[in-house]
Image (spheres, grey):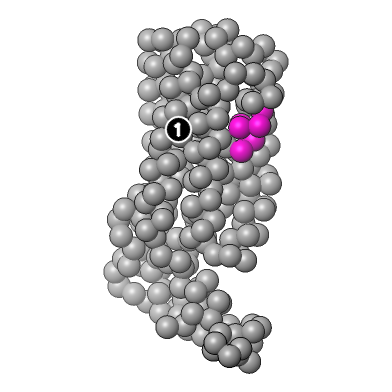
């Protein structure tokens, strides 16, 4: 059944049949259909995730902690708040991605990560650290679940393993390079170095947001919305 504009008013068996047909066609493609910039933007989401997890420990190290205005207990709670944000981020943003689409929510996860990191860079008290750390965690939690979903729905089967590897390699690069870079920044100027560490994360997230804005919605989501053409 369709409305006057020709789009489905409810999901019929024919819609799901068309979705299966189109996603199967994607799987059979012999080559990649996504720009490399989009693939890199997806991979950078994992880079930022593991960069963030490790670098907050450097930002709250013994040399920097006195300049943050936090006690050791407060700093530990702030770190935990970010990890706690992963849970609602994955659940809520994953649910919304099924409703409004993969692309807008991938942009939103990058925006949350950028706002959270920027907010932490500018934080002047404990409540600010908690709030912005939770926002960062939500963005990262959503990204960790949406990036693989996007790849599964848009990457041909023959290339899927290759690009999944690229995403995970980017993540481990963040895990390896992040602490090294953050340690140098922290040692050079512990008074503001911790702010710079967060600013780097925010900058990377804003770059990812801009690149993802040029990505396409997945074929599966377009078909489910009735945009078969």
Left or right of residue 126, residue 180 in this image: left
- Whether the magenta-drawn stretch holds residue 180 is answered as no
Q: Nearer the viewer, residue 182 or 199?
A: 199
Element type where label 1 sits in the image: helix
Give the percent coordinates (x, y) of residue 160.
40, 62
Left or right of residue 31, residue 113 in this image: right
Give the residue at mark 1: 201
The residue positioned 49% from the left and 52% from the top of the image is 107
Crowding around mark 1 (Cα neighbors within 10 Å: few <14, some 14 to 19, many 20+) is many
Q: Nearer the viewer, residue 165 or 32?
A: 32
The residue positioned 37% from the left and 58% from the top of the image is 214
**Where does the N terminus fall, quadrant-wise?**
bottom right
Above or below 218: residue 94: above
Report the magenta residues as a range: 130-135
The residue positioned 45% from the left and 45% from the top of the image is 45
Above or below 88: residue 104: below
The residue positioned 69% from the left and 24% from the top of the image is 127
Give the percent coordinates (x, y) of residue 51.
46, 32
Give the percent coordinates (x, y) of residue 154.
42, 66
- Whether the magenta-drawn stretch holds residue 131 is answered as yes
């Amino acid at each position: 059944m369709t409305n006057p504009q020709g789009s489905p008013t409810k999901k019929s068996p024919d819609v799901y049949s068309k979705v299966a047909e189109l996603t199967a066609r994607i799987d059979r493609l012999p080559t990649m259909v996504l720009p490399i910039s989009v693939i890199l933007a997806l991979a950078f989401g994992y880079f930022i995730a593991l960069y963030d997890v490790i670098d907050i420990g450097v930002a709250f190290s013994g040399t920097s902690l006195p300049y943050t205005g936090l006690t050791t207990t407060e700093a530990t709670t702030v770190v935990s708040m970010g990890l706690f944000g992963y849970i609602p981020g994955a659940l809520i943003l994953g649910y919304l991605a099924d409703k409004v689409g993969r692309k807008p929510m991938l942009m939103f996860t990058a925006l949350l990560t950028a706002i959270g990191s920027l907010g932490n860079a500018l934080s002047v008290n404990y409540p600010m650290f908690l709030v912005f750390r939770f926002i960062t965690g939500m963005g990262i939690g959503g990204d960790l679940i949406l990036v693989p979903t996007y790849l599964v729905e848009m990457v041909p089967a023959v290339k899927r393993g290759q690009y999944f590897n690229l995403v995970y390699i980017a993540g481990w690069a963040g895990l390896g390079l992040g602490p090294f870079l953050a340690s140098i920044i922290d040692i050079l100027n512990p008074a503001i170095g911790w702010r710079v560490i967060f600013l780097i994360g925010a900058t990377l997230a804003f770059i990812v947001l801009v690149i993802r804005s040029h990505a396409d919605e997945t074929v599966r989501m377009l078909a489910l919305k009735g945009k078969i053409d």
